[in-house]
Image (spheres, rainbow, N blue to C red):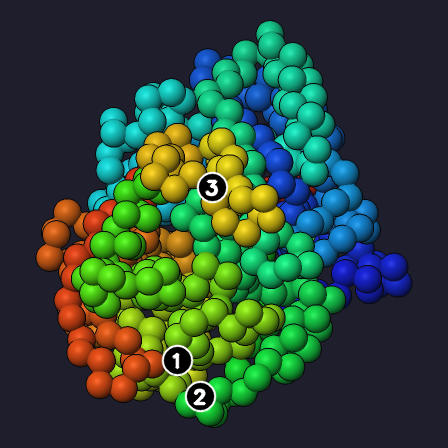
C-alpha cells in the first residue's frame, strides 16, 4: 500500500486500507489544516514505567485517526475544518520511560535527540535556546491539539492540563500556533503565510490519491514555459517516503512516522530591512516597490504570492504555477542557486549537476511539512492583502513552528539542513548557505551572487544577507500507531 499514493476512499470497500487509516494518526497523510493549535511538551522524569504507560493509553484514546480526519474534513486547503484534531508523539526519552513496555524506534538521530545533533545541523547549543521550557531538558512526548476555533483549542488544552495534574507528568512548555494569512488576489480566500509575508507550504509532496488528482490537473493547466520545455515537476510521492511500520503496533498495518519539531524565531523587521537594502544595492537607491519585491524573491525563490521567480520577473496575478523546474535556468541567473526554495527543493539540480540517471537525489530528501506560525497576529490592511505594521514588525517572539513527517530523520531532515541548506557549495561551489534557514558561523558563506536573469545585460553582483531565523528549541519524535498508544502496557 505504501508504494503508490493511498486512495483513502478505498477504505469503504478495502479492509487493508481501512485498517491502515484507522490505526494511523491524523496529520501525517494530510495536513490537519486548522489555523489554531497548541503543542504541549511533556516530561516523564521520575515516573514508573507502568504509570507512563497508563498516561499514554489515556491520551491515546483521544487521538484522532487518519480515517476520522479524512472523513470529517469539509473543506480543502488552506481551510480544512472537520472539528478537533488531537495527536501524540513520543521522543526517545518517552520510549526509555516506558521501559519493557515498548521497543525504541530505529535511527541514531532519533535515539540521540535533536540537541545532541547540533554539530551536524550547525544548531546553537541547548544552553542558547529559549529559557522557558526548551533549555532545561528534552521533552519525552508532545501532545498536538488543533481546531478551527481558538476557544476550542483552549478548552482542550485546559482539559489536558487538569487531567495531567497529579499524574506525575511535567508540562515543560506549551507552544500556541496561530496561522498568519494574507489575501493575494481579490475575491479569493486568504492563504497561509509565514511572518516574512511569503506563502508557506505551497510545494508539498502529495501521497494521497484524491489530493494528487487535483494537483496534477492544476499542473497540467499551467501555462507552458518556453524556456523550460521538459516535463513538469511531479508532486507524486510514495507514502513509504513518509510512513514506516510501527515496531510496537498491535494491528496488521500499524504504521507511524518520524516527526521533527523546531521552534524558529523570525526577526521580521530585520529581514524586511535587509530585503529593501538588497533591492537598493541591486537596482539603485530609487528602486520602486516592484524591484524591492524582486530582491526578496531572489532570497526566497518565489514572490510573496508564491509565483516562482524562475517563471516570472513579477508576480503573475493568476493561479500560481507549481509544476516548474529549473531546466531552463541551469546557470542560476533567473532564480539564484542560493534561493531558499531552490536550496531545499532543487527540482532536478542534483540530477543535472552530478549526472545522475534520475531525479531521486532531488526527491528522496523531501519531507511532508506541517508547520504553522506562532506569535501575535500581524495587523493587516483593510482588504487583508498587506501587513500594516511597516517599521514596527516583530523582532522576537514570533516565527514558525516547523513540523515535518518523514521515514528517516538522517536521510531527510538532517540531510536537507546539513548538505543543502548549510552547505555553501551546494548546488555549485560558492553558492553560499540558504539565506533563510542556513546556519553558519562563517560570514563569507552568507555572501550571495545576484543577477536579474529576466533582464538582458543585467550585471551580476555579490551581496551579503544576514541570518534572521534563529532556533529556540525542538526535538525529534515518533508518531506511533493508535493501537500502540491505546494498548501500551496491557
Q: Residues within 10 Å of mark 1 (few under 14, many from 20)?
A: many
Q: Which mark is residue 326?
A: 1
Residue 170 location, x and y as percent?
50, 16
Residue marked by disc 3: 388
Q: Quadrant of residue 219?
A: bottom right
Q: Quadrant of residue 111?
A: top left
Q: Quadrant of residue 59?
A: top right
Q: Residues within 10 Å of mark 3 (few under 14, many from 20)?
A: some
Dot 1 or dot 3: first in sequence order is 1
Q: Residue at x 38, y 26 (%)?
A: 134
Residue nearest the viewer, comparing 456 with 396: 456
Residue 141 in the figure: left or right of residue 25:
left
Residue 72 visible, this orientation: yes
Q: In whole angstroms, how far apart are the C-alphas of marks 1 and 2?
A: 7 Å
Dot 2 or dot 3: first in sequence order is 2
- Image height check: is 198 above or below 350? above
Amino acid at each position: 500500500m505504501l508504494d503508490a499514493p493511498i486512495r483513502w476512499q478505498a477504505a469503504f470497500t478495502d479492509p487493508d486500507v481501512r485498517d491502515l487509516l484507522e490505526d494511523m494518526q491524523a496529520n501525517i497523510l494530510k495536513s490537519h489544516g486548522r489555523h489554531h493549535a497548541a503543542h504541549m511538551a511533556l516530561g516523564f522524569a521520575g515516573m514508573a514505567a507502568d504509570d507512563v504507560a497508563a498516561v499514554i493509553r489515556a491520551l491515546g484514546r483521544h487521538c484522532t485517526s487518519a480515517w476520522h480526519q479524512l472523513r470529517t474534513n469539509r473543506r480543502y486547503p488552506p481551510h480544512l475544518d472537520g472539528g478537533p484534531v488531537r495527536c501524540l508523539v513520543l521522543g526517545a526519552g518517552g520510549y526509555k520511560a516506558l521501559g519493557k513496555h515498548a521497543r525504541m524506534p530505529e535511527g541514531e538521530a532519533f535515539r540521540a535527540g535533536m540537541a545532541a545533533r547540533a554539530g551536524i545541523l550547525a544548531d546553537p547549543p541547548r544552553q542558547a535556546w529559549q529559557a522557558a521550557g526548551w533549555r532545561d531538558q528534552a521533552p519525552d512526548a508532545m501532545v498536538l491539539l488543533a481546531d478551527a476555533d481558538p476557544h476550542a483549542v483552549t478548552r482542550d488544552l485546559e482539559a489536558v492540563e487538569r487531567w495531567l495534574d497529579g499524574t506525575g507528568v511535567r508540562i515543560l512548555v506549551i507552544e500556541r500556533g496561530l496561522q498568519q494569512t494574507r489575501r493575494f488576489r481579490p475575491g479569493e480566500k486568504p492563504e497561509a503565510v509565514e511572518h516574512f509575508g511569503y506563502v508557506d507550504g505551497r510545494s508539498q509532496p502529495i501521497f494521497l490519491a484524491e489530493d494528487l488528482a487535483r494537483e496534477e490537473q492544476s499542473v497540467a493547466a499551467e501555462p507552458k514555459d518556453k524556456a523550460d520545455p521538459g516535463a513538469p515537476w511531479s508532486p507524486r510521492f510514495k507514502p513509504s517516503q513518509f510512513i514506516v511500520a510501527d515496531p510496537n503496533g498491535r494491528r496488521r498495518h500499524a504504521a507511524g512516522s518520524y516527526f521533527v519539531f523546531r521552534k524558529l524565531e523570525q526577526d521580521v523587521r530585520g529581514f524586511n530591512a535587509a530585503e529593501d537594502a538588497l533591492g537598493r544595492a541591486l537596482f539603485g537607491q530609487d528602486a520602486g516597490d516592484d524591484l524591492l519585491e524582486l530582491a526578496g524573491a531572489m532570497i526566497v525563490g518565489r514572490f510573496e504570492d508564491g509565483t516562482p521567480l524562475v517563471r516570472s520577473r513579477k508576480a503573475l496575478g493568476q493561479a500560481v504555477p507549481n509544476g516548474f523546474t529549473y531546466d531552463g535556468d541551469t546557470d542560476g541567473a533567473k532564480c539564484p542557486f542560493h534561493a531558499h526554495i531552490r536550496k531545499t527543493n532543487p527540482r532536478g539540480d542534483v540530477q543535472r549537476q552530478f549526472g545522475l540517471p534520475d531525479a531521486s537525489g532531488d526527491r528522496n530528501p523531501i519531507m511532508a511539512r506541517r508547520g504553522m506560525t506562532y506569535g501575535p497576529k500581524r495587523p493587516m490592511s483593510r482588504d487583508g492583502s498587506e501587513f500594516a505594521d511597516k517599521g514596527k514588525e516583530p523582532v522576537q517572539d514570533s516565527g514558525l513552528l516547523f513540523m515535518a513527517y518523514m521515514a528517516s530523520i538522517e536521510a531527510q531532515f538532517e540531510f536537507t539542513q546539513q548538505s543543502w541548506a548549510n552547505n555553501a557549495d551546494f548546488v555549485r561551489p560558492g553558492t553560499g548557505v540558504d539565506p533563510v534557514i542556513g546556519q553558519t558561523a562563517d560570514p563569507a558563506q552568507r555572501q550571495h551572487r545576484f543577477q536579474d536573469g529576466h533582464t538582458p545585460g543585467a550585471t551580476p553582483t555579490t551581496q551579503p544577507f544576514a541570518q534572521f531565523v534563529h532556533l529556540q528549541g525542538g526535538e525529534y519524535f515518533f508518531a506511533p500507531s493508535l493501537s500502540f498508544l491505546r494498548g501500551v502496557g496491557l
